Amino acid sequence: MGLFILRRLFQGFLVVLGVTLVVFVATRMVGDPAQVMLPLSATAEQRAAFEHKFGLDRPMAEQFVDFIGDLATFDFGESMWQRRPAMDVIAGRLPNTLKLIAAGLGLAIVLALPLGALAAIRPGGFADRITVFLGLFGLSLPQFWLGLLLIMVFAVTFKVLPTSGYGGWTHFILPAVTLALPAAARLMMLVRSSVIDELNQQYVRTARAKGLRFPQVLFGHALRNALVPFITLAGWEFISALAGYTVVVETVFAWPGLGLTAMQAIKFSDLFLLQAIVFTVAIGIVLVNIVLDVIYKLIDPRIKLA
Amino acid sequence: MDAISEMPLLEVERLQVEFDTRAGIVHGLRGVDLSIRRGETLALVGESGSGKSVTAQAVMGLIDVPGRIAGGDIRWKGQSLLKGDGPRRAKDIRGKEVALIFQDPMTSLNPLITIGAQIGEVLQRHLGMTKAQARIRVLELLEAVGIPAPPRRAAQYPHELSGGMRQRVMIAMAIACEPQLLIADEPTTALDVTIQAQVLELIAGLQETLKLSVILITHDLGVVAGLCQRVAVMYAGRIVETGLADDLFERPSHPYTQGLIRSTPRLDDRLERLVSIEGAPPSLLAPPRGCAFEPRCPIAEARCGTEPPLAIVHAGASAACWKPSQPAWRDVPASAEPAPVS
Ligand SMILES: Nc1ncnc2c1ncn2[C@@H]1O[C@H](COP(=O)(O)OP(=O)(O)OP(=O)(O)O)[C@@H](O)[C@H]1O
Ligand SMILES: [Mg+2]
């Protein structure tokens, strides 16, 4: 197990390096930071000074060598927009995003598992039809629209929750729900179909023939087997949230997390900050994948870690 | 024999099971009559699709959507499992007093749970044992079904065991609560020939030590001859003949039984002549009104267009046929016992 994790960490390291390289090249080709960061009235000298300060006037290859050297010490240079080390900016914002994902994905899982299992008990039955209808509804909800709708209803009309920003636990509710609902719909539909599958397996017949009570058959046997595909999708949801959904949700709710920061970094052509964010997300993805593999192994003894 | 042991343990009466399918209603069981006494071994034989497994599943309460029990009754020690509070009582009987072993040990165990825990589950459910108590009893059970090194095996998962070992685990699970009736649905078809004999021996041994009644579902008549006292022959969702094993092989009454015996290879048969019964069983979507075997029967006549009842032919033997005990095939006399499986 330990060896497996080490090997996966090394593979992950290579992946992160590759991703960082791509971002390094892409960011320098897409926008001209001097143009964006400096006022329109800036003189050519001011511009040159700016580029010199951040090393943008040097050849690309030289910049890259420097960049790799700094990577080793987690030094991503200074955020041009915030005027402080990019990693400091991230260290301040990443926890907010992780908390949001934990709340959102936690809620999604808590909704999806029982609802999906309930629907699977009698496919085509009353409970199933209702959950499938809600699921399809949830699948077709655009996230930003859902966010705005929730703000309108709960913050503007009824004034029971804050519209946006970061503060006490009440600030968590709307963004977490916005993040959770579409994910809950996807997870629920998966739980439903895989539990239906499992309930038709021969080992479930055995469990029933043993005289086990239905909840034990459902939760102790069928759902347990359905967890393997579920974990895959849940991991994918985590990654998608980290790399995408939170950008939308944090922007709608002005949530000071990594997603919102990424939007701002793009807006201000803050190259160093953007690189640091992509690097962080890539590491996150690699770590989540390793954790997933370990969870698989814990659930399914047939899986050999290689 | 005293009155108690004479009373049937399990009685199945006019049992009907239907399945709703896209093509229509499949009449899986069309009035099955069956009974078994304490300590008795009964073989349930018949072609594929004749309803052997469905009968076993109905007894175990495993028929569910798209299937349903459409009529008849199942009685355990004289009390209905289908009517009144029967279904509630049945939950405590199934797995405890009646147990089922399935055909395919490869898929019948949960791949994610240790075999020890899977056996222990039954003990916790029916005997109210704690996990720790169950663990000790599981080791005894594994020992009893001939699994070497029980403590090590109990901690293993199904994929770490061979097919024969898994079937032994299934048997351990089935006898965990010392049931009175064991139903084995083709327990050896999925296994190697050498393992088959071992598993059958194990079942026969347990039958003796635990005073079990056994219903052995099989289409291997050779197995029947060596192992079972009584035989019930199924055809198209009905029992068409029942009798004492020795007697039934000696003088089968129903033409279908005669055909079955005729199509079973025998030791003294050098030519390896395997003559199957011509034609196919009727579609259970639209079963015939009369005798279901009529279209394939060489001695059918006009009255076979109405359903013959399962009636006594001679002492201990019944058949659902208007012309029982008449040789239906000329080339093979309706006698000769099939070779026991080795
Ligand atoms: N779930 C189901 N849906 C539809 N029809 C079914 C279902 N289960 C069983 N049947 C039908 O019921 C009939 C009896 O099937 P059963 O499995 O009892 O046969 P069997 O005698 O056990 O055959 P085999 O020797 O192949 O195991 C068959 O015609 C089968 O098509
Ligand atoms: Mg069968």
Image (cartoon, coloured by chain):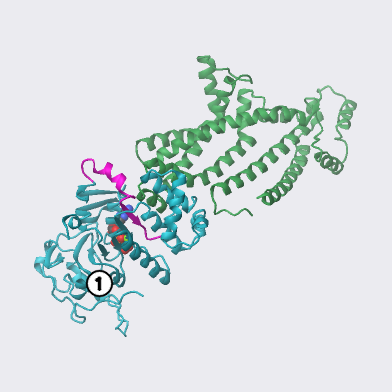
Chain colours: A green, B cyan
Question: The disc numbered 1 marks a residue on which chain?
Answer: B
Q: On the rendered structure, is A187 left or right of B254?
A: right
- Residue A110 percent location from the top left of the image: 50, 33
The answer to whether residue B9 is seen in the rendering is: yes
Quadrant in the rendering for residue B284: bottom left
Quadrant of image for the C terminus of chain A: bottom right
Q: On the rendered structure, is A73 left or right of B323?
A: right
Give the residues drawn in magenta, as a range: B82-106
- Residue at the location (85% across, 40% down)? A66
What's under tag 1, amino acid-wise? Leu
Q: Is residue A35 above or below residue B260?
A: above
- Residue A64 percent location from the top left of the image: 83, 42
* Residue A152 is covered by the magenta coloring: no
Tell me: is circle 1 under 8 Å from ligand 1. Answer: no
Quadrant in the rendering for residue A54: top right
- Which of the four quarters of the rendered structure image does ligand 2 lie in? bottom left
- Residue at the location (34% across, 74% down)? B341
View extreme (left): residue = B303
Q: Is residue A291 above or below residue B339?
A: above
Q: Residues within 10 Å of mark 1 (few under 14, many from 20)?
A: many
Residue at image mark 1: B260
